Image: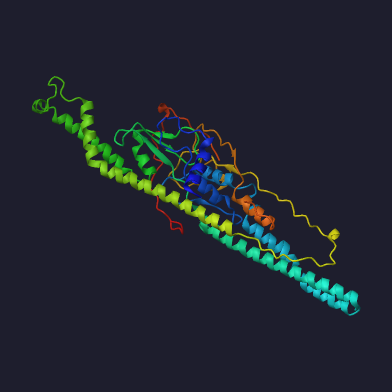
Amino acid sequence: MSDNESTSALDAAGAGRPGCSHPDCGNATAHPAERHWQQVMAAVPVEGQSHRPKATATSYPTGADFRAALAAVRPDDADAHSLQHLRTAWTDEVSGRLADWPERIRSHLADLAEGWSGAGFDAFEAACDQTRGLVEDLIDDVDATAASLQAAEDALHLIQGGGAGEIPYPAAQFWIDGDWHSWVSVHIRPAWWHGDCIRYTCQDAEHVLALAGAEPALATEIIDYIDERILHHIDRYARPDAVERDGLDPAQGLTVEEAKDLAVADATEHYATLVEQSWGAYAARHTAVDDDLVRRNADTEAELRSLRTVRSDKDYPAAADPAYMDLEPPPLDQPTGTETPRAADEPSLQPPTLSEDAAEEDRPSGDAAAPSAVPAAVGTAAATSAIIADPWTAPAATGAARSTDEADLAEDGNLWGVVDEDDDPYA
């Protein structure tokens, strides 16, 4: 997919989604990696899969949001549409049932030959031999198709994290309203978020840095440094000679606001490079997660493009009567139930509990509304099911918005931290 096509897809994904009401918010309404995650996880390679977010030195989604996103991009009864299920059905229900037919035809024909001969038998024998050849070719075709399914199944299973089931989850976006040393709030926007961003005040600077995978102590160090420099400048200008030397009003001296300005200037000079490096490192981690999902999506698309059913075109025996054949292709039962995900919860430091009975435990308390689904086009599972269900034809999300006023800015509660990245073929 070209850059223009990718941008168009991203714009389309966010077209019907409410964004942040702040006119200058720099967070994209639709996360740039959402589409790639959806397309990677829409495929269902094996039955009974379990997945979890891969540790990427950024925050985690809650278990409820992760489960909801996975369920949204997959059809109802996903196991029934898995490549493993389709492969075993072809093997067991088709080639398995036909496996002994060639020998049965040969054996029964030999029995008939003991009491039947002549031109009639010769014609019948020729038709039986042709039929046996068709059955043998059909078994070979099914076995080749099953092998193709097995290869795609194994490859997609690995792309989705293999046995561990660990898959990168799009890292939350953030935007600073103001300068890093004196910001009004930080806007945090998880993937598939609707409405206003989650906002944190400067009192939560440690949380914001931890969310970005940076060292929270840096924020504490900068805050303490500014406080120390404020006191330093106030003490310094408490001396009349300093006030007179710098041309200040002797009657007023140095105001607290002026002391703050001087302290911020000191902090800017002292920490600017370190802060820039810290945010740059976050941007690199964010890009690494996005690039990982782009690669996985490209590999998924390549596997699906290479997936083919095998068919040997041969004529029916001349004596075959179409009146006794069912030549109509079976109706395709397209997967249903796919949606666009929608996040409802704030990100969390802790890896989510993914068992279904823990769904309520890992959803934060509050008055957030339950997710409502937005219909979307049938994804990868539909394509793979249609390809395998009919070998002759190959076909080409969501949670409550959280609107916050400045008075309702999230504060306190140490929810964040740093995690180690696990080994992974796509790391």
Q: 268 above or below 159?
A: above
Residue at x-position 89% and y-position 80%? 114
Q: How many marks?
A: 0
- Could you tell me if residue 4 is visible in this image? yes
Residue at x-position 64% and y-position 46%? 76
Q: Quadrant of the C terminus?
A: bottom left
Q: How is the image coloured?
A: rainbow
Q: Farthest bottom residue?
A: 114
Q: Farthest left residue?
A: 241
Task: Find residue 249 and report its horizontal and vertical position in percent.
Answer: 14, 21
- Could you tell me if residue 213 is visible in this image? no
Residue at x-position 53% and y-position 39%? 12
Q: 300 above or below 375?
A: below
Residue at x-position 83% and y-position 67%? 318
Task: Find residue 30 and report its horizontal and vertical position in percent.
Answer: 48, 40
Q: 234 above or below 125?
A: above
Q: 259 above or below 277?
A: above
Task: Find residue 53 and report its horizontal and vertical position in percent.
Answer: 48, 50
Q: Farthest top residue?
A: 251
Task: Find residue 230 and report its horizontal and vertical position in percent.
Answer: 21, 32
